[in-house]
Image (cartoon, grey):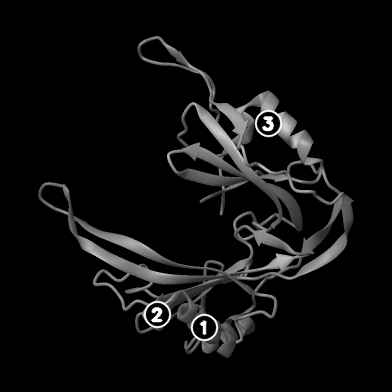
């Protein structure tokens, strides 16, 4: 998930002098509006600054002898493995730099069930699996290996290989998924061997319950302002004559790893948008009447 900069999709003039209009926004035929609560709790995101002692413990748990501080991060290297821990956000990245981004020659297939067990065991044995972490997804990435001819500058394909298996752990607060860069764990596996870990996990303190904005008000605002409002802040999207809203859900948003000034875990409405051609994305709108709350999207 990423915060996207603002982009306007206004009616434009083509080279031939013809104009094109923004697409029609429609609800899918099977669009069901859930019954949302009248209010939800808001949580404060507690400080997660990492000191050298904590960084040392994390490093030793992952097999590193120690850490050094470089530019606001604690880093370590051991053979082909590299570790980084962000001092301010607590975000941890660790991996075998030769394999974490994919295995050009392929890797033995591991079933989703086995991959999840291996990932869970790896984290639990090192004290990196919180009690409230829940398995969210297991997926296998495909990679295409290419190279650039230094004489001609042309790109030629060396072959296609299988990437690593990614096992994702997430979190639910008050039965709602926490989305955003501030909360989640991912384990990368090549065959049965862990080749990478990404982890960002925060503590949340409840502040109280607040009334939700009725989703009908957001929907009316989208319909009156069109695609500019629905996709406000989303870069680089391509759509046809019609944009379809296929569903909506409530979630909590923590994007504090990227947007470090975010202080609160906030409820958001997530709208699944079909741009056509098999392109889906989920856009998030603040569910509370708070000023200056950022707008987020997740590509699906």
Residue at the far top in the pictured view: 17
- Cα gap from disc 1 to disc 2, whole angstroms: 23 Å
Q: Quadrant of residue 169?
A: bottom right
Percent position (x, y) of residue 120? 55, 82
Q: Is residue 248 visible?
A: yes
- Which residue is more in the foreground, 58 or 162? 162
Q: Earlier in the sequence, mark 2 or mark 3?
A: 2
Residue 43 in the image: above or below residue 58? above
Whether residues under marks 1 and 2 lie with C-beta atoms below 8 angstroms apart, the answer is: no
- Which residue is more in the foreground, 191 or 62? 191
Please give the residue where the numbered disc 2 appears in the rendered image: 81
Please give the residue where the numbered disc 3 appears in the rendered image: 222
As helix, strand or loop, the secondary structure at mark 1 comes to helix
User: Which label sits in the foreground, 2 or 3?
Assistant: 3
Percent position (x, y) of residue 146? 22, 57
Q: Is residue 235 visible?
A: no
Please give the residue where the numbered disc 1 appears in the rendered image: 117
Percent position (x, y) of residue 182? 63, 62
Which residue: 61% across, 37% down?
Answer: 29
Which residue: 57% across, 36% down?
Answer: 244
């Amino acid at each position: 998930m990423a915060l996207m900069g603002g982009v306007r999709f206004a009616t434009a003039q083509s080279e031939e002098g013809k104009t094109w209009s923004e697409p029609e926004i429609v609800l899918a035929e099977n669009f069901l509006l859930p019954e949302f609560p009248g209010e939800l709790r808001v949580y404060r995101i507690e400080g997660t600054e990492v000191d050298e002692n904590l960084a040392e413990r994390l490093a030793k748990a992952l097999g590193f002898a120690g850490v050094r501080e470089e530019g606001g991060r604690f880093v370590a290297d051991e053979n082909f493995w590299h570790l980084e821990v962000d001092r301010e956000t607590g975000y941890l990245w660790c991996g075998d730099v030769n394999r974490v981004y994919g295995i050009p020659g392929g890797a033995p297939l591991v079933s989703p069930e086995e991959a999840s067990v291996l990932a869970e065991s790896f984290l639990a044995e090192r004290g990196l699996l919180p009690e409230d972490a829940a398995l969210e997804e297991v997926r296998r990435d495909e990679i295409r290996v290419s190279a650039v001819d230094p004489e001609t500058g042309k790109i030629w394909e060396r072959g296609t290989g299988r990437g690593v298996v990614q096992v994702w752990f997430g979190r639910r607060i008050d039965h709602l998924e926490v989305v955003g860069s501030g909360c989640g764990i991912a384990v990368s596996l090549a065959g049965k061997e862990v080749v990478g870990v990404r982890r960002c996990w925060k503590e949340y303190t409840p502040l109280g319950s607040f009334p939700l904005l009725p989703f009908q008000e957001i929907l009316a605002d989208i319909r009156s302002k069109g695609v500019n409002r629905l996709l406000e802040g989303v870069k680089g999207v391509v759509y046809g004559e019609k944009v379809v809203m296929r569903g909506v859900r409530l979630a909590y948003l923590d994007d504090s790893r990227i947007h470090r000034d975010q202080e609160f875990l906030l409820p958001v409405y997530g709208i699944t948008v079909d741009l056509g051609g098999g392109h889906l994305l989920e856009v998030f709108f603040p569910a509370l009447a708070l000023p200056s709350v950022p707008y987020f999207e997740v590509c699906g």
